[in-house]
Image (cartoon, rainbow, N blue to C red):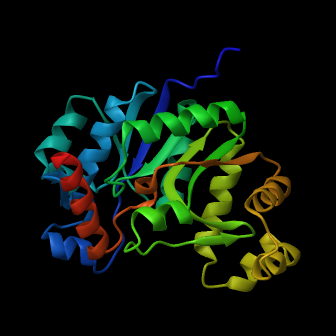
Amino acid sequence: MQESKLCCVTALVLAGSRPGRDSVAEVAGVSIKVLAPVGGEPMVVRVLKTLEASHSVEQRVLCGPSWDVLEGQDFLHDLVKKKAVRWVAPQQGPSLSVKSFLAESPQDLPLLVTTADHALLTVEMVEYFLQEASRAHVDVAVALVPYSVVAAAYPQSKRTVIRFKGGGYCGCNLFLLCTPKAEQLVEFWTQVERERKRPLRLIRRLGWVMLLRYVLGLLSLSDALGELSQRMGISIKEIILPFPEAAIDVDTPEDLALVEQIIEKKMQA
């Protein structure tokens, strides 16, 4: 039986910055976090080079940083000037950036979404995720790594863990929006960001029963995504990655130091 293979996706790299102080940027001595050097080059550059090396990525779109910042970065500015990378202005938050891009470029589906602080992203991770997502035949695919895999490899890494019946999972900042229906999930994502300070409104959207099952440890990951899929009228599938590094992005100075250590060790191997 011939394997299903997904190719020619557009990759959207979220490289905006949040207002206010950023400890990673301060430690690295740069204006915004995504410019922090890792392994001798800015994180955002590492991500763009990884996507360029993937045979499944047809074009790269850089959402952010602001044009003023971009003009001061010769490598990034040259990529955009030579049209090797498309640049679009970031919006106020990642979900609004994705929503805006889809509204202006609906033809760019399927769309791989990742972040510029995913400094450990590799071609192997991208190809594995896209291959498994193509087999799922869904509207949206979400990459996750079991927390047990991350903890075994990097016990010192402090990651956000979503705990379900049967084990916890860490996000990977890798999403594949496959069909126009995926816009409904992006809209839901926008609402979650907007109502993060109004938990009762968010709970009503998710459903009290599902919330109670989650709190009691009775909700499995597949059941949660199944319920969410049913409520939204779209199909969402988790793609479990075997790479612990896929769950490590750079949110703190400690993350930055860990990523540097991982890259240095790989370079010496």
* Quarter of the rendering occupied by the N terminus: top right
Outermost residue to the right: 209
Outermost residue to the top: 1
Give percent across and percent down for residue 130: 54, 35
Residue, x 46% and y 72% (percent of image)? 159
> Does residue 109 appear anywhere in the picture?
no
Is 262 positioned to the left or the right of 133 in the image? left
Residue nearer the viewer, 49 or 254: 254
Residue, x 56% and y 30% (percent of image)? 107
Give percent across and percent down for residue 178: 64, 36
Picture quarter containing residue 235?
Answer: top right
Is 40 positioned to the left or the right of 204 in the image? left
Give percent across and percent down for residue 206: 79, 70
Give percent across and percent down for residue 232: 80, 55
Residue, x 49% and y 24% (percent of image)? 8
Residue, x 40% and y 61% (percent of image)? 248
